Image (spheres, grey):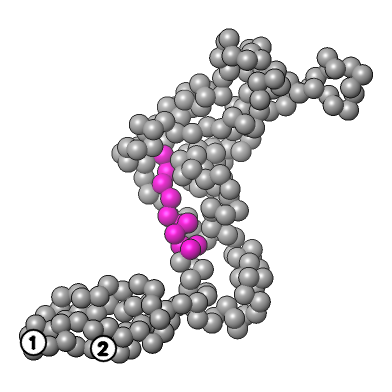
Amino acid sequence: MANYFKRLPNINYQNLEDLSNPGKTFQNKNLFRRAKLREDIASNMTFFEDYFIQADERPDNVAFKVYGEEDLDWVILITNNILNIQDEWPMPTNLYNEYLLEKYGSYEAIYEVHHYESKVITNVDGVRVLPGGLEVDDNFKFEYFEETIGKHVTLEDCSNAVTNYVYEERIQEKKRTIKVLKPKYLNLVFEDTAEIMSYRKGSTGFISRTLKDTESI
């Protein structure tokens, strides 16, 4: 993220520890500024490629694979609108195991049933009459009208148990599928980011395109 923080503009803060000298300030990065993709880019899938996060890959690992530079991890994050890596990126294996144990209390509980889901049901012609994956009760039964025999049919054993482990794995797997901006479009993002990060002359607290006073927050 070092590359990203270098792009952030500065802001003057008053030194609250020295109220006897109210004019004394110090500069820090303005974390209220945030880079984002332009809507016309974000909504056009030709700018992107699908990527599946492998094992314990971090954003900087993905950036190196795609762009050859670890410091472009911020491009990976803004492309996927990720604000909180802890919640929105797949957990490393060691942390994931700790998370499961803390959440469910024991290894046995991790493999207990979380919920039940419907099985795929088809009629005698092979036409699907019930999709799989619907959350149902453990004793779920399904009834449908079978036209070939002209009557209703009731089926039992129409559900599958989904354990806590499988439930959590699905959540992690969803996080592994991301999109990456094609390298040839990087300069567009750099130019847009420079514009977003710049202060406009005439705005409150404006000092320069890279510095403004606290009053503007």
The residue furthest right is: 20
Number of marks present in the image shown: 2
Which residue is under mark 1? 150
Which of the two residues, 44 or 217, is positioned nearer the viewer here? 217
Residue 193 lies left or right of residue 117; in this view the side is: right
Which numbered tag is attached to residue 198? none
Question: Is residue 116 positioned above or below 185 on the image?
Answer: below
Q: Earlier in the sequence, mark 2 or mark 1?
A: 1
Q: Is residue 119 visible?
A: yes
Vertical comparison of 141 with 192: above or below: below
Please report the bounds of the magenta region as a residue range: 171-182
| Residue that label 2 marks | 155
Image location of residue 85, percent across then percent down = 58, 50
The reply to whether the C-beta atoms of the residues labelled 2 and 1 are less than 8 Å apart is: no
The residue type indicated by label 2 comes to Leu
Amino acid type, label 1? Gly
State the image coordinates of residue 37 (x, y, percent, origin top left): 44, 33
Residue at x 63% of width, y 15% of height: 204
Which one is closest to the eye, mark 2 or mark 1?
1
**What is the x, y in percent for residue 155?**
26, 88
Instruction: Classify mark 1: helix, strand or loop.
Output: loop
Give the side of residue 135 with respect to residue 206, left or right.
left
